[in-house]
Image (cartoon, rainbow, N blue to C red):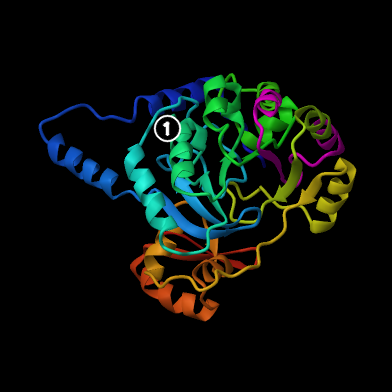
Amino acid sequence: MIPKPLSDSARTQNTAAHIAGGRSPKNKTSRSKKSRGRTAARAKVYVYGPVPSRRLGFSLGVDILPAKTCSLDCIYCQLGPTPRLTTRRRPYFPLKTILAEIKEKIDSGNQIDHITFSGSGEPTLNTSIGRLIGGIKKMSAIPVAVLTNSTLLTDKKARRDILAADVVVPSLDAATEEGFIRINRPPAGLTAKKIIDGLIEFRREYKGRIWLEVMLVKGINDSPSEIRALKEAIALIKPDKVQLNTVVRPPAEDFARPLSRHLLEKIRRGMGPGTEVTAEFRKTQPGRRPGDAAEAVSAMVRRRPVSLQDVARSLGKTATAVRISLAPLIRSGKIRARTHRGVIYYEKG
């Protein structure tokens, strides 16, 4: 059974709790906790990969949010349910520290096809994203991509902040209000119409490439009426291409199930030219510079479950070598192996 969406009052409480930052009352013993918190903030790794991406090749991920901070609570999300549901934009982390980590990765000599803002939630929630994109442009010619759930494109400042990106991959999973609530579980006041209007406005302002992603979930947003509404909305948005996707990694909700390849292809044909089914990534990182495999995988699984094949391709190693490298992490409980639909995934312990 599909759980009912949170009530408006419950969502308001969730959002208010996040905006308050979850602070506990001050007391005399809080100093050591604050010190540990500052140490943890300094230790945060903002950049991970390069990881194999089905759309972007070897993608250097840039994670500029606390896990998991998002404006939606999608049933298919590989990061699990959203504990920090918010539409409030903030700077979150030090700009210079993030740029320094990006530069270090660029200088490592590994193949990077895109530098991608993704990771622990909705990246446009971070008000520093525009300055970060500008900083990357000054240090490298590697294309910058932004993966967004489109919710903040209703905000003129948020749209402006990502205009310098080379590729923006926004999502639109449903064009009806009922479908939007069922699949994306938004906070109160956010509607499918507002998101579609924001996407239309962004297309007018943005000169780069827009690859619109549609995540299809069996029995949720794949009915003829839902597909028809999506097709009508896409005609107004005018993206450069439409990428149909379905559930691959372990989702937030067990009832979020994938569509068959046959059905995806049928929907693609109905959508018309410019629509494609996202293909599996099969390349292997060429001559990756030696490094700490355990550390690299730990950084990956903090953001999403990664398959054994993904890890092997990212590190340029065989599946057997990866299993040997990761065995100590599994024994220590830092990561765990999970089989989902016949595929081994590694995720946080």
Residue 186 can be seen, yes or no? no
Vertical placement of residue 168 versus 107, above or below:
above
Tell me where residue 99 appears, x and y as whole percent.
38, 45
Vertical placement of residue 330 versus 88, above or below:
below
* Quarter of the C terminus within the rendering: bottom left
The amino acid type of the residue labelled 1 equals Ser
The magenta stretch is 200-229
Residue at image mark 1? 128
Q: Quadrant of residue 180?
A: top right
Of residue 222 and residue 266, the one placed in the foreground of this image is: 266
On the rendered structure, is 234 left or right of 297? right
Find out whether residue 159 is within the magenta segment. Answer: no
Vertical placement of residue 42 versus 9, above or below:
below
On the rendered structure, is 314 left or right of 16? right
Of residue 13 and residue 31, the one placed in the foreground of this image is: 31
On the rendered structure, is 22 left or right of 58? left
Of residue 190 and residue 244, the one placed in the foreground of this image is: 244
* Quarter of the N terminus within the rendering: top right
| Mark 1 secondary-structure assignment | loop
Q: Residue at x 66, y 47 (%)?
A: 256
Q: Residue at x 47, y 51 (%)?
A: 303
Count of numbered marks: 1
Find out whether residue 227 is within the magenta segment. Answer: yes
Residue 158 can be seen, yes or no? yes
Tell me where residue 318 appears, x and y as whole percent.
53, 78
On the rendered structure, is 235 left or right of 292? right
Q: Quick one: label 1, few (<14), some, or many (20+) residues within 10 Å? A: some
Q: Quadrant of residue 271?
A: top right
Tell me where residue 42 appears, x and y as whole percent.
26, 46
Tell me where residue 100 appears, x and y as whole percent.
35, 48
